[in-house]
Each structure stands twice: as structure tokens, then as C-alpha cells.
Amino acid sequence: MSESKSFGLFVGFLLCATGASCPIELSPPSVVVRYGDPVSINCSTSDGHSAEMGWEATVGSTIIQNVPHVAWTVERLIQTDYDVTSICFYNPPSGASSDQCSKTSTVVVYTFPETIGISGPGGVMVEGETCQFTCDVPNIAPVQNLTVKWYKGDAMIHEDTFKNVGAGKKPVNQSSVLNFTATRQDNGLTVRCEAHLDLRPNGPQLNASSQELKVTVHFGPEGECLSLDKLELQEGDTLGGRCPMTGRPEPDVNWLKDGQTVDPAAPMNRTDAGRYTVSAESASFVRRELTVHVLYGPEFKCPHTYTAVENAPHILSCNLTGYPQPDIVWRKDGKDVVLPEVLTRHDSGQYSITALSKLSNVSVTMEINVLYEPTQIVELEDSEVDVGSDVWLICSSTGNPQPQYSWDFYQAPNVMVKNDDGVARLHIRDANAYNEGSYTCHATNDRGRVSKTANVTVKGAGGMECPIQITPERMVVQHQSRDSHRANCTPTSEGSMHLKSKYWEDKHAGKTTGTYWSAAPDGGWNPEPKCIATFHRIGECWKELNLTIYKTPDSVSIRAEDNSLSTVEGRSFQMWCDVSNVAPAGSVTVRWYRGNETFEPSSRGPLRVTDCQPNNCDPSAVAHPQNVSSSITVTLNRTDSGAEFRCEAQLDLGPEGPQPAPSATSGPLNITVYYKPAINTTKLPKAIPVFRGYPEELVCEADGLPPPKIHWTYSSQQVLNESEDTLTVSEAGVYNCTATNEVDSTYYVVQVILKEDYLPLIAGFVAVTVVAISIVFLFIYSIYYKNTKMRRYSLKNPKLDTPSSNVAHNGWDMQFPMTKLS
């Protein structure tokens, strides 16, 4: 550099330092230029005079020139140190008011790479671990204007600036480091960086983006069971379903029990409970030991019944299973109880045992039976009875099992023992001398025995019953039967030692020696046979054979009251069953049949002797055949009409008589049940609309027996068409349908409402409207035609012309002078 230039530069610097006013302008005052690109700055004086001007620069300096302006130009800015300084200096001409000065331009040289690089962890990241991504920006200047932005997907997550890197202006290779902590949500996302060089306001804003790095994040394994010491699941659940494992990649889960591999998809049952080891491997390996409990509801194995001995310790136990261990509640008679260790008789009964758990409740019932010995006998007391009367001795005791009773007494045929409902009853019927004495009752069960004795005294035992017996006690014989019927007469065991003699006697055969009495085929109706015996101590006594001679009825017939074969529904109706020539009449039982089924009438009359005299109507008063009748009263309805009624007479002669009991049945009796009419209102509404000119049929149907007759009554003056149950009406009014038969009559009133048929009126109105519209249209059209189609003229001073026989047509040949109007 020449000395003049150096001096000028120095003076310029000095002037600038002193702050003197410098009349030069730089255009532009500052530039931003890419390395290797051209650059130009014009320096001019503002006083309008030529002066010595020049540029002093690290590259592209100019010589001093006497010009009003001078430019600093560099075709390619390739300064290696990037520290470019350019100063324009000014030496004013002599006489100028300004002083020597200079101005320095701001020159920023930049470089920006076409591509930037990104690097990071290769392969797979593990959730929670922190790794570094590096963004490399090569050959960048000035680095202080550089900003690096980091993106995860489309979201910016970090920004890095380099304002404090240093004052150097040379290109550098700059890196930005991102500390990245991976989460499972980041899996599959991409990471990239962008370099932004902001040279505004005088320079450009440059951007460059790196490639995208895909993030793969592994995590797990995770699962509730990996943090538990105890696991509870229900029967049917699976380990895999109850303990799902998550992770990336899919965890490899292994369950072990007692060193054996367990299928986690297999349903669990109660026997699978125990100690398990679960291991899972995904991003890491986890191993856990835990106790598995299988929940299941309570289950009972209890006896349905349990028997214990009173006041002895019991060994009652129930096998109760369930997890968690259920609570047990005992209930008896609706109250919570505690079963004692030693049971008494009061603990017998039915118990409800309920097992309670959080899963379910289960109840069973158990019958506890406590055995104990019989208690002391009660109710057995000494008795005094008149001869021929009855007496009951009652022996009662409680025990478990229920005591069995036995009696010690002098055996007699008129003494009967019956055990019922835990009580022993001894019945002495027709007490006699043989029944006096002591009666001891014993109550016994497996646990012990108790006894008690009572004495019976028979007052008037001197009139004891004759000690003989007739076999059979009762004999049933058909009248004039050729079959053999014999009765045997023997002394009782008590009277046999005192017997002197015995024989038979009846009304017809008289006295007959021997042991047997035989019924004669031609005997009468009431021979009254009896066995007569003489004893040493009590003398002569006798017993009569209970003999029944029977005859089946000659006929059985059924008849209605007054021989009527009809009745009215709902009324009482009486029927008679006549049984002719039957004996004994008192043994006749009458049954009634409707069709093939028996029925019980609402009231039944007693069996009476036909045509009996007053005070002689009891059928059991006479042994010979009689005609008897039985009546019933029933209330029939229409469904009974035509049904067959029959009666059956049966001779009930007891177990000694023929089996089955003889019976005879009447012929059928058919009864007709009349009932009042009922009008069918479903076909006949209460109110019926009728349009004028359109007759309507009213149909009145009625059900009844006999079939009812239909009659219409009405207030209309018009003669109506009436045919049986149908009435044709065309006028409003009240119409009464009456149904009548022999039983009763009923009626039904119909209100006929007359309505006008407005359809013809509407049609007429429409026609009149059309005609009126047509007339109006023709009128309007005529006016229109006259005003638009015909010519209009006005006569002005008309003068008659000589008649020429011409006819004027639309004014063309008119003989009158006319003025055309339109």
C-alpha cells in the first residue's frame, strides 16, 4: 500500500474517531455475501464536489481518485480469513467546509451447506434410557447466526443456538446434540434436525433439513403380576387372562409351578393353587415368585340327618371347602344359634347351615335327632265304670325314638288296644266283670323302659254279658237263597267251664239243638235266631244272631217332578229315583249320574218309603221288601239341556254282604232346559248413521230356547220393509228390537241418525262454478276481441249518397264519409 493511501486511511480513521461530520454516503452501508460471490459498494460525497476518494480494504482496494464517487467491487469474494474490512476515505478539495473523513462498510461473508447430517443410536432404544442424537452442520459461517431445530414427527422438541460460540468469522463444522429420553409412545416416530441461518435484515434466511431417523422403542415386560406377592383368581380364569403382560417386543412369558411349565391359557381350578414363578422377557427380563389362590364358593358335604345321644358329646362335623375360608352360620327356627358340644332333646330339629363368602352363599339343611329314654307315663289313672259302658285308658310318654307301648291285663274280647300319634289307648267296650283288675302300660325304646299301672272297677258287674259268642257275628243272606249259611254258637273261654247247656231258637223253626243254626230257603223275613245257654254261676242267658235278609230291587226308575221333561234355566228342578220291592230298604244308597259322571246335587231329600203312612216312612223300620224313593233338587243351565240323567240304587250290606254291592240303574231321563233370549249386540250398534236416500238394514239376532221371535217397533210413519230379523230403515228415529220366547223377552234400542249426502250438492256447486267461470271468460274474451280485432270508426258530417246497392264491409265500401279512429 502507498504512503498516501496509508496516510489517507489513517486520517480517515482519525476523523471517524473524533466524531467529525463526514460528507460521504455508502450504498449499501452493509452487505451480506456468500463466499465466492461478487460484491459492490458505492461511496459518494454529499457536497456535490469532486474530491480525493478511495477504498482501503482487505481485498479490492482502490487508488485515490478525484471523483465525486468511487465503488468498491470484488468479482469473487474468496478471502480466506472471512474477516473482510472495507473503508471509504474522503479528502475534501481546498476551500471545502468539510474535513477529511472515512466510513467503514459492514461486510458479512457466509457459507451454508447444501446438506446436513444426523446421527443417533442405531437399532433399538429402550424406554426410559437417554441417548444422544447429533446434527452435523458442515462449513457454516457465520456460526453466530445459526439455529438448529430438532423435530419428533412434526413437532419441534428442541432448539439450539450458537450466539456465544465465539467471535470467529471463518466457516466451522458445527454440531448440535439432542439428549433424547425414549417413551413407548415414541415408537415408530421419526427424528430430524433443521439448520436455519438467519442473515436478516440485509441477507437471506437459509434452511436445510437432515434425513429422518425412525425411532424404535422397546419396553417392558409389564404386568400387574410382576409386582404382586399374592394373586387371587376365580375358577375358570386363566393365568394369562388374569395376568396379561405388555411390552415391545411381545413378551415371552413363562409360568412354572414346582419346576414344571404351566400353560397360562388353561382354565384354573381349586387344585391349581400354590406357589408359582412367572418370568417375562421383552426389553428386559423380569422374574417373580408369587402365591396363587383360586377362589371358589363354599361347598358343603354334610349329612342330611345326624343322630346323637342326649348328654353325650357329639362328633358332628361337616366337610366345608372354599377359598377364602367361608363363615358358618347355624340357624334354627329362623334364629341364629350356636350348636352346643353336648346335645339335649331340645336341640333336636331342622337346622339351616349357611356358608358365607365374598363369592357366594350356600345353604344346606340338616335334621339333628337326639335320642333319649322314655319319660314317665302320664294320663294313665284308675277308672271306675258302669257295667256295659265304655272306658278308655290312655298311656302317654315321650322319647326318641318314639316309645313302643305294651299292656299287661286280663285278656277279654271287648278290650282293644290302639297306638296312634305316640299315644297308647286301651278301649274297654261294654265293660263287664271280666274287665275288672289292673292294667299296666310299658313304654319302651332303645334307651330305656318305664311302666305304670291303673286299676279298673266295673260297677254292677252282676249283670254281665252272656259269655257266649256267635260266629259269624253278622250274617247276610239273600232271600230264598239255596246256598248254605250257618252260624256257630260257642261259649267264651271264660264261660266254657261253667256251661250247662245251649241251643238255637227262631220264630219259624222253634227250638233246635246243636251248635249250628242254618237259614231255611223258605224261611220268613225276620226269624230272629238266637243262641240260648245256661251256666252254673250266672244262669240262663242268650245272644241273638245279627241276621240281614236282603232282596235286590225289582226295578229302578227316574222321574221328574210332575213328570215334566222341561224346565227353565236357573230354576230349581226336582227329580225322583223310585226303587221297588227291595229289602232291607234302609241299606239302599242312591247315586245320581249326569251322562257317565256322578254329581252331587245342591240338595238331597231323605230316603222315604213310597206311599207311607204318617210316622211310618222310615225304611229301616221294616225288614220285608218296600218301595222307596229318593229325591234331589238341582238348578240346571242351558248346557244341561238334552243331557241324560240316571240314578243308581245300591244295597250296601257291609263287609259281610256280597261284594261288590248289588246295584241297579234306571233308564235315562232327558230334560230340556229353556232359557231367555239374548240379543247379539255385536252386529247391532247403539247408534247407526243413515244417509238420506240410502236405506240401511238393521239385523237383530237373538239366541234362546225355544228360539225367540223377533219384533221391531218404531215411531216412523213410513211403512218399513221388515223381514224376520232384518229391518230396512231410511229415516231417523228410535227402533226397538224385541226378542220373545216362552221364558222371557228382552229388547234392544237402536238410534238411527239421518245424515245428508252432500255429494250431489257439491257436484252441483262445482258445475255452477264452472259455468260462471266460463261466462266470465267469454265476456272478457269478447271485450278483448272487440278492442283488438275489430276496426273502430266515427261518422263526421255524413251525407247520404245515391243508393248503389253496395254493402259496406268493415268500412271499405261504406257510402258515408268516415274518419278512421284506429
Image (spheres, rainbow, N blue to C red):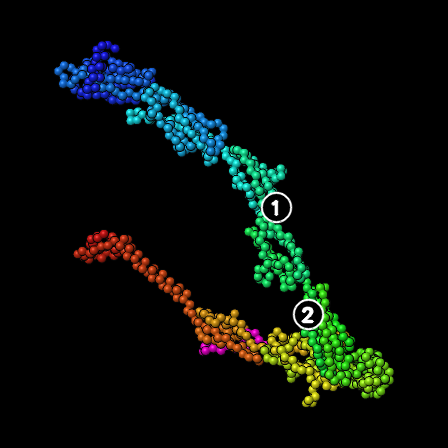
Q: Identify whether 646 is placed above or below 231.
A: below
Q: Which mark is residue 269?
A: 1
Highlighted range, magenta: 702-719
Q: Residues within 10 Å of mark 1 (few under 14, many from 20)?
A: some
Q: Residues within 10 Å of mark 2 (few under 14, many from 20)?
A: some
Q: Which mark is residue 376?
A: 2
Q: CA distance from mark 1 to mark 2?
A: 57 Å
- Check if mark 1's residue and mark 2's residue have beta carbons within 8 Å: no
Q: Is residue 548 magenta?
A: no
Secondary structure at badge 1 equals: loop
Which residue lies most toward the right here?
Answer: 514
Q: Position of residue 249 (x, y in %)?
A: 53, 34
Instruction: Tell me: 18 left or right of 528.
Output: left
Q: Identify whether 249 is placed above or below 716.
A: above
Give residue 440's quadrant in the image: bottom right
Please name the amino acid that badge 1 sits on.
Asn
Q: Identify whether 360 is placed above or below 438.
A: above
Instruction: Tell me: 335 left or right of 306.
Output: left
Q: Position of residue 221 (x, y in %)?
A: 52, 36
Residues 82 and 610: in front is 82
Q: Residue at x 64, y 81 (%)?
A: 574
Tell me, yes or no, if residue 372 can be seen here: yes
Tell me, yes or no, if residue 523 can be seen here: no
Secondary structure at badge 2 equals: loop
First in sequence: mark 1 vs mark 2: 1
Please name the amino acid that badge 2 sits on.
Gln
Give residue 71's quadrant in the image: top left
Q: Position of residue 362 (x, y in %)?
A: 59, 55
Q: Residue at x 75, y 78 (%)?
A: 437
Discs 1/2, front: 2
Q: Residue at x 57, y 53 (%)?
A: 327
